[in-house]
């Protein structure tokens, strides 16, 4: 059985070496049975190409490596593309919600870095964002924080998308001075 797992992992690395992954949380759960306790593990993983694509997944198994593998596979299947300004920050301020979790994400000038807590930081690093200021309000549960962050990132739109939706030119949306920079994005 171990050989099959190793072969499968090698194949995954050859298929998609461009993806980086980050283990956000691992949770040990136990079930009490007649002979004692049975332990299981749940893993939360964020995967991204650091060029504007990111996804998260969770996996459960009796052993940690198997839970991480399952979570990584799910994260790769659920990847979304997020438009970035100049490839380093968000286009506009956004707010995301999931359950009791609420996150606020703001654009930041160059050199600010990633100012965000735990699970949100992992999402931004895997996404390829270099400058952002973010705050989590409400739930500190890593699952809810990541879902709220992904909800907010799903709402983001680039000037090009807004112009296309309105049937205008990018220059009309931004104004003449910012038009060349937005056309690159």
Image (spheres, grey):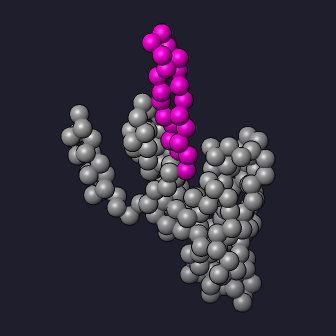
Q: Is the magenta stretch mostly helix, strand or loop?
A: strand
Q: Where is residue 44 in the image (x, y as percent from the top left)?
A: 53, 44
Q: Is residue 133 above or below residue 28?
A: below
Per the rendered image, the range of residues in magenta is 24-44
Answer whether residue 92 is magenta in the image.
no
Q: Position of residue 184 (x, y in %)?
A: 56, 81
45 relative position to 168: left or right:
left
Answer whether residue 33 is magenta in the image.
yes
77 relative position to 129: left or right:
left
* Residue 13 can be seen, yes or no: yes
| Residue furthest bottom as drawn | 177
Q: Quadrant of residue 92?
A: bottom right
Q: In this view, does 53 lie above or below 31?
A: below
* Residue 162 can be seen, yes or no: no
At 73% from the left and 40% from the top, the residue drawn is: 99
At 72% from the left and 88% from the top, the residue drawn is: 176
10 relative position to 148: left or right:
left
Depth check: 170 or 57 in front? Answer: 57
Q: In which quarter of the image is the C terminus?
A: bottom right
Depth check: 65 or 51 in front? Answer: 65
Q: In which quarter of the image is residue 121?
A: bottom right
| Residue furthest front as drawn | 36
| Residue furthest top as drawn | 34
Q: Where is residue 14 in the image (x, y as percent from the top left)?
A: 27, 58
At 64% from the left and 69% from the top, the residue drawn is: 114
Q: Where is residue 137 in the image (x, y as percent from the top left)?
A: 78, 52
At 45% from the left and 12% from the top, the residue drawn is: 35
């Amino acid at each position: 059985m171990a050989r099959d797992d190793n072969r499968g992992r090698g194949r995954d690395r050859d298929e998609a070496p461009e993806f980086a992954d980050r283990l956000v949380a691992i949770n040990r759960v136990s079930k009490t049975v007649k002979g004692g306790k049975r332990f299981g593990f749940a893993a939360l993983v964020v995967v991204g190409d650091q060029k504007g694509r990111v996804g998260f997944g969770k996996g459960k198994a009796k052993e940690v490596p198997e839970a991480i593998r399952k979570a990584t596979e799910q994260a790769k299947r659920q990847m979304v593309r997020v438009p970035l300004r100049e490839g380093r920050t968000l286009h506009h301020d956004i707010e995301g919600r999931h359950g009791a979790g609420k996150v606020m994400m703001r654009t930041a000038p160059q050199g600010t870095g990633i100012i965000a807590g735990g699970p949100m930081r992992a999402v931004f690093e895997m996404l390829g964002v270099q400058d952002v200021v973010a705050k989590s309000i409400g739930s500190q549960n890593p699952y809810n924080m990541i879902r709220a962050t992904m909800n907010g990132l799903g709402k983001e739109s680039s000037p090009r998308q807004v112009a296309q939706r309105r049937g205008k030119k990018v220059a009309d949306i931004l104004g003449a001075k910012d038009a060349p920079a937005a056309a690159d994005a």
